[in-house]
Image: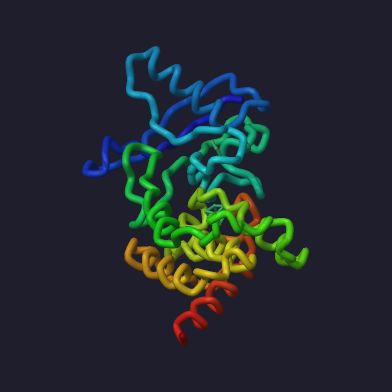
Protein backbone atom coordinates (compact mmCIF):
# COMPACT_ATOMS: atom_id res chain seq x y z
CA UNK A 1 0.00 0.00 0.00
CA UNK A 2 1.05 3.57 -0.65
CA UNK A 3 -0.37 6.03 1.87
CA UNK A 4 -0.45 9.73 2.67
CA UNK A 5 -0.08 10.55 6.37
CA UNK A 6 -1.11 13.85 7.91
CA UNK A 7 0.65 13.93 11.28
CA UNK A 8 0.57 16.44 14.12
CA UNK A 9 4.10 17.78 14.70
CA UNK A 10 4.87 19.90 17.75
CA UNK A 11 8.39 20.55 19.04
CA UNK A 12 7.35 20.79 22.69
CA UNK A 13 4.52 21.86 24.96
CA UNK A 14 5.29 25.56 24.44
CA UNK A 15 5.57 25.54 20.65
CA UNK A 16 2.78 25.89 18.15
CA UNK A 17 1.93 22.59 16.44
CA UNK A 18 0.82 21.88 12.86
CA UNK A 19 -0.19 19.04 10.58
CA UNK A 20 2.61 17.83 8.29
CA UNK A 21 2.07 15.58 5.28
CA UNK A 22 4.25 12.51 4.60
CA UNK A 23 4.14 9.68 2.05
CA UNK A 24 4.89 6.05 2.92
CA UNK A 25 5.25 3.37 0.27
CA UNK A 26 5.21 -0.46 0.12
CA UNK A 27 3.34 -0.83 3.41
CA UNK A 28 2.23 -4.44 3.97
CA UNK A 29 -1.37 -5.05 5.08
CA UNK A 30 0.08 -7.40 7.71
CA UNK A 31 2.01 -4.61 9.45
CA UNK A 32 0.70 -3.08 12.63
CA UNK A 33 -0.04 0.65 12.64
CA UNK A 34 3.03 1.32 14.80
CA UNK A 35 5.24 -0.72 12.44
CA UNK A 36 3.99 1.53 9.63
CA UNK A 37 5.10 4.55 11.71
CA UNK A 38 8.47 2.79 12.28
CA UNK A 39 8.87 2.64 8.49
CA UNK A 40 8.13 6.35 8.23
CA UNK A 41 10.61 7.17 10.99
CA UNK A 42 13.37 5.06 9.39
CA UNK A 43 12.82 7.05 6.17
CA UNK A 44 12.94 10.35 8.07
CA UNK A 45 16.13 9.39 9.94
CA UNK A 46 17.77 8.26 6.66
CA UNK A 47 16.95 11.69 5.20
CA UNK A 48 18.38 13.45 8.27
CA UNK A 49 14.96 14.64 9.45
CA UNK A 50 13.49 14.50 12.95
CA UNK A 51 11.47 11.26 13.48
CA UNK A 52 7.88 11.50 14.69
CA UNK A 53 7.67 11.04 18.48
CA UNK A 54 4.92 8.62 19.57
CA UNK A 55 4.32 6.59 22.73
CA UNK A 56 4.50 2.79 22.85
CA UNK A 57 5.84 0.06 25.08
CA UNK A 58 4.33 -3.44 25.11
CA UNK A 59 2.88 -3.37 21.57
CA UNK A 60 0.40 -6.06 22.61
CA UNK A 61 -2.51 -4.14 24.12
CA UNK A 62 -1.44 -4.27 27.75
CA UNK A 63 0.42 -1.11 28.79
CA UNK A 64 -1.95 1.57 27.41
CA UNK A 65 0.89 3.76 26.11
CA UNK A 66 0.04 3.87 22.39
CA UNK A 67 -2.37 6.78 22.47
CA UNK A 68 -3.13 7.93 18.93
CA UNK A 69 -6.18 9.63 17.45
CA UNK A 70 -6.45 8.14 13.96
CA UNK A 71 -8.87 9.56 11.39
CA UNK A 72 -10.83 11.17 14.23
CA UNK A 73 -11.11 8.02 16.39
CA UNK A 74 -9.18 7.04 19.49
CA UNK A 75 -7.09 3.92 18.62
CA UNK A 76 -8.35 4.10 15.03
CA UNK A 77 -11.23 2.50 13.10
CA UNK A 78 -11.24 -0.99 14.68
CA UNK A 79 -13.10 -1.86 17.93
CA UNK A 80 -11.85 -3.38 21.19
CA UNK A 81 -8.19 -2.85 20.39
CA UNK A 82 -5.36 -0.43 21.11
CA UNK A 83 -3.39 1.40 18.41
CA UNK A 84 -0.56 -1.16 18.62
CA UNK A 85 -3.08 -3.93 17.80
CA UNK A 86 -4.45 -2.05 14.78
CA UNK A 87 -3.45 -3.64 11.48
CA UNK A 88 -2.85 -1.88 8.19
CA UNK A 89 -5.42 -4.18 6.51
CA UNK A 90 -8.01 -1.81 8.00
CA UNK A 91 -6.85 0.75 5.40
CA UNK A 92 -6.78 0.82 1.61
CA UNK A 93 -4.07 1.63 -0.90
CA UNK A 94 -4.10 5.36 -1.61
CA UNK A 95 -5.74 6.31 1.71
CA UNK A 96 -4.94 9.53 3.53
CA UNK A 97 -4.64 8.91 7.28
CA UNK A 98 -4.79 11.70 9.86
CA UNK A 99 -2.84 11.06 13.07
CA UNK A 100 -3.17 13.32 16.12
CA UNK A 101 -2.33 13.12 19.82
CA UNK A 102 -5.06 12.83 22.49
CA UNK A 103 -6.72 16.24 22.76
CA UNK A 104 -7.50 17.25 26.37
CA UNK A 105 -6.41 20.11 28.61
CA UNK A 106 -5.47 17.61 31.31
CA UNK A 107 -3.23 15.73 28.80
CA UNK A 108 -0.81 18.44 27.57
CA UNK A 109 1.29 17.62 24.51
CA UNK A 110 4.93 16.84 25.34
CA UNK A 111 6.11 16.34 21.76
CA UNK A 112 4.39 15.44 18.46
CA UNK A 113 2.00 12.60 19.31
CA UNK A 114 3.08 12.13 22.94
CA UNK A 115 0.93 13.60 25.70
CA UNK A 116 1.50 13.80 29.45
CA UNK A 117 -0.94 11.40 31.15
CA UNK A 118 0.50 11.63 34.66
CA UNK A 119 -2.86 13.14 35.73
CA UNK A 120 -4.15 9.53 35.70
CA UNK A 121 -1.35 8.48 38.05
CA UNK A 122 -2.15 11.29 40.48
CA UNK A 123 -5.81 10.20 40.50
CA UNK A 124 -4.79 6.62 41.30
CA UNK A 125 -2.43 7.84 44.03
CA UNK A 126 -5.30 9.84 45.54
CA UNK A 127 -7.24 6.55 45.76
CA UNK A 128 -4.61 5.13 48.08
CA UNK A 129 -4.22 1.50 49.05
CA UNK A 130 -6.43 -1.17 50.57
CA UNK A 131 -5.92 -2.12 54.23
CA UNK A 132 -4.62 -5.63 54.71
CA UNK A 133 -3.80 -7.00 58.14
CA UNK A 134 -0.23 -8.25 57.85
CA UNK A 135 0.33 -8.64 61.59
CA UNK A 136 0.50 -12.41 61.45
CA UNK A 137 -3.27 -12.86 61.59
CA UNK A 138 -3.71 -12.37 57.86
CA UNK A 139 -6.85 -14.01 56.59
CA UNK A 140 -6.36 -16.30 53.61
CA UNK A 141 -7.86 -14.43 50.63
CA UNK A 142 -9.51 -17.66 49.48
CA UNK A 143 -11.39 -17.84 52.81
CA UNK A 144 -13.24 -14.56 52.06
CA UNK A 145 -16.49 -15.44 50.26
CA UNK A 146 -17.09 -13.25 47.20
CA UNK A 147 -20.11 -13.71 44.93
CA UNK A 148 -19.01 -14.87 41.48
CA UNK A 149 -20.77 -11.96 39.74
CA UNK A 150 -18.96 -9.39 41.91
CA UNK A 151 -15.61 -11.07 41.28
CA UNK A 152 -16.27 -11.06 37.53
CA UNK A 153 -17.38 -7.40 37.48
CA UNK A 154 -14.34 -6.39 39.54
CA UNK A 155 -12.05 -8.25 37.15
CA UNK A 156 -13.74 -6.57 34.17
CA UNK A 157 -13.18 -3.14 35.76
CA UNK A 158 -9.55 -4.02 36.54
CA UNK A 159 -8.89 -4.62 32.85
CA UNK A 160 -8.72 -0.83 32.28
CA UNK A 161 -5.19 -0.12 31.04
CA UNK A 162 -5.25 3.63 31.66
CA UNK A 163 -4.80 4.49 27.99
CA UNK A 164 -6.93 7.65 28.08
CA UNK A 165 -8.99 6.90 24.96
CA UNK A 166 -12.14 7.62 26.98
CA UNK A 167 -10.88 11.13 27.74
CA UNK A 168 -9.78 11.77 24.16
CA UNK A 169 -13.14 10.62 22.82
CA UNK A 170 -15.36 12.56 25.23
CA UNK A 171 -16.38 16.03 24.06
CA UNK A 172 -15.97 17.16 27.69
CA UNK A 173 -12.62 15.37 28.09
CA UNK A 174 -14.17 13.50 30.98
CA UNK A 175 -12.09 10.90 32.82
CA UNK A 176 -15.13 9.33 34.47
CA UNK A 177 -14.90 5.95 32.72
CA UNK A 178 -11.28 5.55 33.83
CA UNK A 179 -11.91 6.73 37.40
CA UNK A 180 -15.08 4.65 37.64
CA UNK A 181 -13.16 1.53 36.59
CA UNK A 182 -10.54 2.15 39.27
CA UNK A 183 -13.19 2.86 41.93
CA UNK A 184 -15.26 -0.18 40.93
CA UNK A 185 -12.48 -2.76 40.92
CA UNK A 186 -12.06 -2.18 44.68
CA UNK A 187 -15.62 -1.23 45.65
CA UNK A 188 -16.94 -4.58 44.41
CA UNK A 189 -14.69 -6.63 46.69
CA UNK A 190 -14.87 -6.94 50.50
CA UNK A 191 -11.15 -6.09 50.74
CA UNK A 192 -11.82 -2.76 49.03
CA UNK A 193 -14.85 -1.77 51.14
CA UNK A 194 -12.78 -0.61 54.15
CA UNK A 195 -11.60 2.64 52.52
CA UNK A 196 -14.27 2.73 49.78
CA UNK A 197 -15.84 6.03 50.92
CA UNK A 198 -12.53 7.91 51.24
CA UNK A 199 -11.28 6.42 47.99
CA UNK A 200 -14.17 7.61 45.84
CA UNK A 201 -14.19 11.08 47.43
CA UNK A 202 -10.43 11.53 46.98
CA UNK A 203 -10.29 10.19 43.43
CA UNK A 204 -13.21 12.31 42.21
CA UNK A 205 -11.71 15.37 43.92
CA UNK A 206 -8.35 14.77 42.20
CA UNK A 207 -10.10 14.18 38.86
CA UNK A 208 -11.72 17.62 39.15
CA UNK A 209 -8.42 19.25 40.20
CA UNK A 210 -6.70 17.85 37.11
CA UNK A 211 -9.19 19.66 34.86
CA UNK A 212 -11.15 16.75 33.40
CA UNK A 213 -14.74 17.57 32.43
CA UNK A 214 -17.91 15.92 33.62
CA UNK A 215 -19.66 12.94 31.98
CA UNK A 216 -21.74 13.84 28.91
CA UNK A 217 -23.87 10.66 29.11
CA UNK A 218 -23.27 10.11 25.38
CA UNK A 219 -21.40 6.84 25.93
CA UNK A 220 -18.70 7.58 23.34
CA UNK A 221 -16.06 6.51 25.89
CA UNK A 222 -17.50 3.00 26.18
CA UNK A 223 -17.56 2.62 22.38
CA UNK A 224 -13.90 3.60 21.96
CA UNK A 225 -12.54 1.89 25.08
CA UNK A 226 -10.19 -0.89 23.94
CA UNK A 227 -11.08 -2.98 27.00
CA UNK A 228 -14.86 -2.62 26.80
CA UNK A 229 -15.17 -0.91 30.20
CA UNK A 230 -18.90 -0.53 30.78
CA UNK A 231 -20.76 2.70 31.54
CA UNK A 232 -22.29 0.78 34.46
CA UNK A 233 -19.05 1.52 36.29
CA UNK A 234 -19.85 5.26 36.11
CA UNK A 235 -23.28 4.59 37.61
CA UNK A 236 -21.61 2.55 40.38
CA UNK A 237 -19.08 5.33 41.04
CA UNK A 238 -21.91 7.88 41.27
CA UNK A 239 -23.73 5.68 43.80
CA UNK A 240 -20.52 5.23 45.80
CA UNK A 241 -19.93 9.00 45.71
CA UNK A 242 -23.47 9.81 46.85
CA UNK A 243 -23.23 7.32 49.74
CA UNK A 244 -19.83 8.67 50.78
CA UNK A 245 -21.08 12.29 50.62
CA UNK A 246 -23.91 11.46 53.05
CA UNK A 247 -21.62 10.06 55.73
S1 LIG B 1 -11.61 3.10 30.65
FE1 LIG B 1 -10.97 2.20 28.67
S2 LIG B 1 -10.47 3.96 27.38
FE2 LIG B 1 -10.48 4.69 29.50
S3 LIG B 1 -8.38 4.53 30.23
FE3 LIG B 1 -9.41 2.59 30.81
S4 LIG B 1 -9.00 1.20 29.09
FE4 LIG B 1 -8.53 3.27 28.33
S1 LIG C 1 1.98 -0.23 23.21
FE1 LIG C 1 1.15 -1.15 25.05
S2 LIG C 1 -1.00 -1.11 24.73
FE2 LIG C 1 -0.19 -0.38 22.83
Query: Which residue reaches farthest right?
Result: 148
Q: Please state the total of marks drawn on the protein image.
A: 0
Seen as rendered, the residue at the extreme top is 46
Question: Residue, x 43% and y 65% (percent of image)?
Answer: 203
Classify residue 228 by image quadrant. Answer: bottom right
Scheme by which the image is coloured = rainbow
Q: Is residue 56 above or below residue 235?
A: above
Please identify the residue farthest to the left as the structure is shown.
14
Residue furthest bottom in the image: 246
Q: Is residue 123 above or below residue 111?
A: below
**Where in the figure is residue 106, as x and y percent of width and height?**
35, 56
Which residue shows up at 49% across the image and 65% down it?
176
Image quarter where the N terminus lies is top right
Q: Is the residue 214 above or below the residue 3 in the image?
A: below
Left or right: where does residue 10 sit relative to residue 174?
left
Q: Nearer the viewer, residue 13 or 202?
A: 202
Q: Say which quarter of the image contains residue 87.
A: top right
Rendering quadrant holding ligand 1: bottom right
- Percent x, y for residue 99? 46, 40
State the image coordinates of residue 67 (x, y, percent, origin top left).
48, 43
Q: Residue at x 51, y 21 (%)?
A: 39
* Residue 20 position (above or below residue 38): below
Query: Relative to 65, is 109 on the left or the right?
Result: left
Rendering coords of residue 170 (x, y %) = 48, 62
In terms of depth relative to the viewer, which is nearer, 136 or 106? Answer: 136
Amino acid sequence: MNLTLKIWRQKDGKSQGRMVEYKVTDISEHMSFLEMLDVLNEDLVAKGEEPVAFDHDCREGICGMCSLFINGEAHGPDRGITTCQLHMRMFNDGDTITIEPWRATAFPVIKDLIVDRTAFERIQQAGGYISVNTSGNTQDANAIPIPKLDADLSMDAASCIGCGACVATCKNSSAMLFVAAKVSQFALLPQGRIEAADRVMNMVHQMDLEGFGNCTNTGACEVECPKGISLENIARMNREYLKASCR
